[in-house]
Amino acid sequence: MPEPVNPSVASNDAQTPSTANDAATSTGADTGTAAETIGADGTVSVDPGTGLPVDTTATTQVAVNDGFLSLPVIEQVDRAGVVGWVLAAMALIGLVLFFYKLVGFLRRGVFADGFVGDVEKHLTNGDEAQAADLLARRRHPAARIGLSGLNLSVSSAAEREAASDLIGARARKEIDGLNGGLRIMSAIAVLSPLLGLLGTVMGMIEAFQKMEGAGSRIDPSVLSGGIWLALLTTAIGLVVAIPATAFHMWMQGVIGRAAAVMEDVCTMVVNRDELSHRARQKASNVSELRHAAE
């Protein structure tokens, strides 16, 4: 007869592979967790409360996000909600546009306009070669326009009129290039306070809705908190609008000055023959007066 089988022994034998597999799985999981919790210096972060390893990757990511949002400016913008983030984006666009235009002005030499007097002196003396050499060494838009105008004939009235029209068209093209981006800055300056006011109105509506829901149990702190959060969007809108308005006015002034310099140079180039003629006539008159005095 076969010997009876002990149920407890069979049960233990049957559970042995499972236990081994569970142990292997547990070891692998612990190894993976330990691998994730080992720092760059080889140390393992452990939770002091539970004694278990801590995933430092997720903790670091959360800490970075919390640190970013806890910045004073970012925190106030985040409290203002969607309107606050829209205003922050507009402020960033305006700042980038300002530096872009500033670099463009410097590259075009808009601020270096002290050559007009020397050009007038050379043209008055009839020395067009010196005037052309001076204009060729300048980066100002007026210098390029004046240099192209010196290549045009202005002997007769018809030629002067044609040269004036051609130079004027080139000057308008240069001014249009300088004006690029000003509409965006103007839109930011105009829309920022309006968006801030919109956020304030929406915040006030929400605050009064909370008061209506509270009924007779009105908490003054709820009303005051809702009001200052509502006014926060108006403050952010003004903070964005005031520098944008100042930048826009400053850029308009720079472009206006450049346009005036272009007009002066174009006038001198088109009427250069008359300038030199008047200078010679004035010199001859002075010479005649000297002879008369002698």
Image: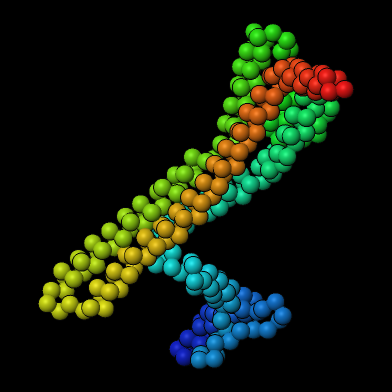
Classify the position of the C terminus by image quarter. Answer: top right
Q: Residue at x 78, y 19 (%)?
A: 285
In the image: residue 33, left or right of residue 226: right
Task: State whether residue 171 appears in this view.
Answer: yes
Q: What is the basis of the colouring in this image?
A: rainbow
Residue 133 image point, x, y percent = 83, 28
Above or below, 171 against 111 in this view is above
Task: State whether residue 10 appears in this view.
Answer: no
Above or below, 108 against 77 in this view is above
Residue 50 image point, x, y percent = 51, 90
Q: Residue at x 68, y 28 (%)?
A: 265
Above or below, 45 against 288 in this view is below
Residue lying farthest to the left in this orientation: 216
Q: Residue at x 58, y 87 (%)?
A: 46
Residue nearest the viewer, comparing 22 with 133? 133
Residue 116 image point, x, y percent = 72, 34
In the image: residue 162, left or right of residue 73: right
Q: Residue at x 72, y 80 (%)?
A: 41
Residue nearest the viewer, comparing 279 with 89? 279
Above or below, 195 against 266 in this view is below
Residue 58 image point, x, y percent = 54, 73
**Count of numbered badges drawn on the protein:** 0
